[in-house]
Image (cartoon, rainbow, N blue to C red):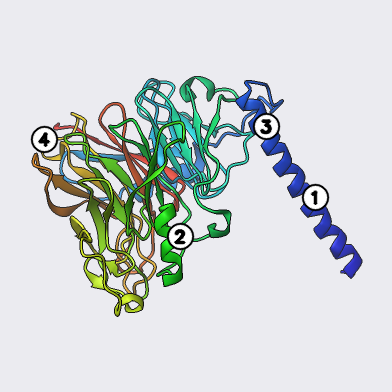
Amino acid sequence: MKAKHWVSMVLGATALTALASSAGADNLGKLQDFKSTGASLRIQTVDQGGARAAQIRENLKKVKLPAGFKIDLYAIVPDARHMAVGPNVGVVFVGTRKADVWAVTDRDRDRVGDEVKRFAPSIDFKVPNGPCMSKDGFLYLAEHNRVMVFPAAEFFYESPDVAVEVVAQSLIPSEEESFNHGARVCRIGPDNKLYVSLGQPYNVPDKGKLTLYNEQGIGGIVRMERNGKSREVFARGIRNSVGMDFNPANGELWFTDNQVDGMGDDIPPGELNRTTRAGQHFGFPWYGGGMVRTAEYKDSEPPKDAVAPAVEMPAHAADLGMTFYSGSQFPTKYRNGIFSAQHGSWNRTKPVGARIMFTEVKPDGTNGKPEVFAEGWLNDGTGEYLGRPVDVVQYLDGSLLVSDDLAGAIYRISYSAN
């Protein structure tokens, strides 16, 4: 290919990208002003049948659950990551680490998603991993470096145009944006404030970054009013949390955290953490996971009040999404306990994870030992993943939905004593 022609192609692609970005920004402005964007009414949908759905159902036969539980395919959702369930219709909004947000609707109420379509197709999303829903029906979406809110999302989602406001235009300084650990999650707390996790981009950050990160809440969790004002750092010393939820019994925030890689197969442990007040420090980067010290900070004194994890999980299982179970469908044992997803290891000679864990939480706020609730997505003989669970949410009827970004699917776990 001649150099002149190659340069022309590159410039053409750059121009198209700039035009698309400009159009996306213009569309967002229109939507904020309740104006039509002119987007096509033929919204992209995902086929729910065929050989792919049949094979996913076949793979699910390998998943083991406690007696009385069963797992089914709820919907095929490409790159499915974190989820939020609408409080009225039960639309499941699904984020991805790419550029799509999906809306899954069970129209005939048979507990299977009938329609999966692109949500707000005229908006240019960037790593829209973290949707969360307020009790009064506002959908919040935490992207890599922006948070948006969609009022009445379950009302507007049928159309390509949706009501939207930008809550936070910048979560972190633009120069700190990274392809690594940039998937955010969010929750609305019992104080009616918005909480957002901010993973830091390194395996272990350089000491020169700590002052900035402490100020900005990078490697921590920030909270703000639902309109984005009064932002503050709620928790620090967190490597990369991609799952959090509030204990409905006492309002305490719990969160998962992913430990340092490259320290060996069996250290450091993964974490499930409990906050008891604002301003706590959870030990990273002095501790790589649990109370295991990092080589980079071994000669530096860790914070004296560093909080140890409430639960230590197997090393490198990649603990991600979590939820407190408040439904009535499951047996009493599971009430107010934590279901959490382990995505599965990459930094281990023998893979571990790809399963759903359950951790009992007692009335006094303390916890029991974690136990395996659902497993079978990992072939122990070959190390092959049939799926990689990402998030767990409770559906309106008390069943659980589990997202899987490898299979590109959402599963439904239900219980019947019969």
The front one of 394 and 61 is: 394
Would you say 88 lies left or right of 128 here?
left
Q: Position of residue 270 (x, y in %)?
A: 27, 62
What is the spatial separation of the Cα atoms under label 2 and label 3, in whole angstroms? 34 Å
**Location of residue 53 (image quadrant):** top left
What is the spatial separation of the Cα atoms under label 3 and label 4, in whole angstroms? 48 Å
Q: Which residue is mark 3?
A: 27
Q: Position of residue 241 (x, y in %)?
A: 36, 53
Q: Residue at x 70, y 34 (%)?
A: 26
Q: Using a 10 Å C-alpha cutoff, classify the residue at mark 3 as few (fewer than 14 neighbours), some (14 to 19) or many (20 or more).
A: many
Q: Which residue is mark 4?
A: 332
What is the spatial separation of the Cα atoms under label 2 and label 1, in whole angstroms? 35 Å
Q: Residue at x 41, y 71 (%)?
A: 207
What is the spatial separation of the Cα atoms under label 3 and label 1, in whole angstroms? 18 Å
The label number, if any, that marks residue 285 in the structure image: none
The front one of 170 and 304 is: 304
Q: Earlier in the sequence, mark 2 or mark 4?
A: 2
Q: Secondary structure at mark 4?
A: helix
Q: Which residue is mark 2?
A: 212
Nearer the observer, disc 3 or disc 4?
A: 3
